[in-house]
Image (cartoon, helix red, strand yellow):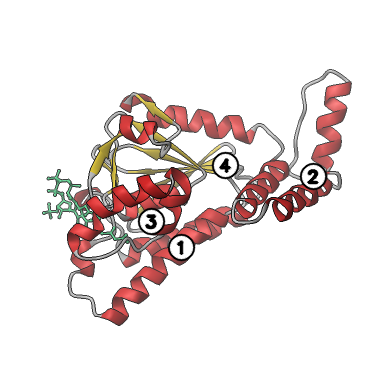
Amino acid sequence: MGFNNILFEKDGKIALVSINRPKALNALNSETLKELDVVIDQIAEDDDIYAVVLTGAGEKAFVAGADITEMKDMTTVEGRKFGILGNKVFRKLELLDKPVIAAINGFALGGGCELSLACDIRLASEKAKFGQPEVGLGITPGFGGTQRLTRVVGLGMAKELIYTAKIIKADEALRIGLVNRVIESDKLLDEAKALANQIAANAPIAVKLCKAAINRGIQSDIDTALSYESEAFGECFSTEDQKEGMTAFTERRDKSFKNK
Ligand code: CAA
């Protein structure tokens, strides 16, 4: 399927997905959300993709939010439906059984900040700017901001950002733990790909099980969470890659994982 608003390419074991509506600063309209939904399915079904980099096309924006032009005249029912669509797609991304790195190259506002929050790891360029400007538009965050931002930066900081609608720069995003690293703009994509390749060099099933255990565990009490870990740990021993990883170690040779 060809996409109007998304670029999708494979580079070895990694996939690069770019939201591509630069004239609207990559704002997410319904069509883009639906295309993202399809891309996520394609990536999920492709056993040769081990990690994903998600970015925004153009110089200025990762994603400048949900599309305000589309939302402007929505009714209550339409607004709810749009919110449910965004939440469904972002949740699918969060649950994708491969790690996703957000390479945040510019504005990550509203739905853009929320999109990055549905990714596993956030890397920001020096030019990146973050915020949840929704209350300034008369709405609440609608694609997970009230929930995921809180889980990433904590209750007080999330409330300050959401209630004030203020926009923060990359260094402040780093200080509050919203991003893992700030990188020179022209090196961002290469560093994101390098990180994805570093992950892709490991046993993909083990990485997938780590993602599920971490994501499920963080929502659970510690005993339940540790049971997820034990389940994942045990499951690894049914894989060829566990045998390969440990045999390669004992034989002091390079390992060769097969995603099996
Ligand atoms: N929706 C639709 N169009 C958008 C957009 C958005 N979220 N953000 C930017 N654009 C469009 C602008 O309308 C403009 O289009 P035209 O050239 O056709 O007029 C184009 O992108 C370039 O934008 P600007 O001229 O405004 O660029 P700027 O450099 O002066 O400002 C900006 C950049 C500060 C990011 C500004 O565009 C802006 O504030 N955008 C809106 C950010 C925002 O409020 N996002 C949250 C949306 S609500 C949301 O996301 C809800 C949710 O949780 C699901």
Q: Is residue 73 above or below residue 212?
A: below
Residue type of the residue flagged with mark 1: Val
Residue 145's tag is: 3
Q: Nearer the viewer, residue 61 or 155?
A: 155
Query: Dot 2 lies on which element?
Result: helix
Question: Is 36 situated left or right of 220 in this image?
Answer: left
**Are dots 1 and 2 in contact, CB under 8 Å?**
no
Tell me the crowding category of disc 3: few under 14, some 14 to 19, or many 20 or more residues within 10 angstroms, Cα based.
many
Tell me the crowding category of disc 4: few under 14, some 14 to 19, or many 20 or more residues within 10 angstroms, Cα based.
many
Q: Nearer the viewer, residue 156 or 199?
A: 156
Give coordinates of residue 208: x percent, y percent. Answer: 66, 47
Give coordinates of residue 210: x percent, y percent. Answer: 67, 44
Of the numbered discs 2 and 4, the one sitting upstream in the chain is 4
Closer to the camera: disc 1 or disc 3?
A: 3
Q: Quadrant of residue 257?
A: top right
**Are dots 4 and 1 in contact, CB under 8 Å?**
no
Residue 233's tag is: 2
**Residue at the spot of label 4:** 51
Residue type of the residue flagged with mark 4: Ala
Residue at x 57% of width, y 36% of height:
12
Of the numbered discs 1 and 3, the one sitting upstream in the chain is 1
Residue type of the residue flagged with mark 2: Phe
In this view of the protein, can residue 198 be seen by the observer? yes
The answer for how far apart the CA atoms under marks 4 and 3 are is 24 Å
Q: Quadrant of residue 84?
A: bottom left
Query: Dot 3 lies on which element?
Result: helix
Tell me the crowding category of disc 1: few under 14, some 14 to 19, or many 20 or more residues within 10 angstroms, Cα based.
many
Closer to the camera: disc 1 or disc 2?
A: 2
Residue type of the residue flagged with mark 3: Gly
Tell me the crowding category of disc 2: few under 14, some 14 to 19, or many 20 or more residues within 10 angstroms, Cα based.
some
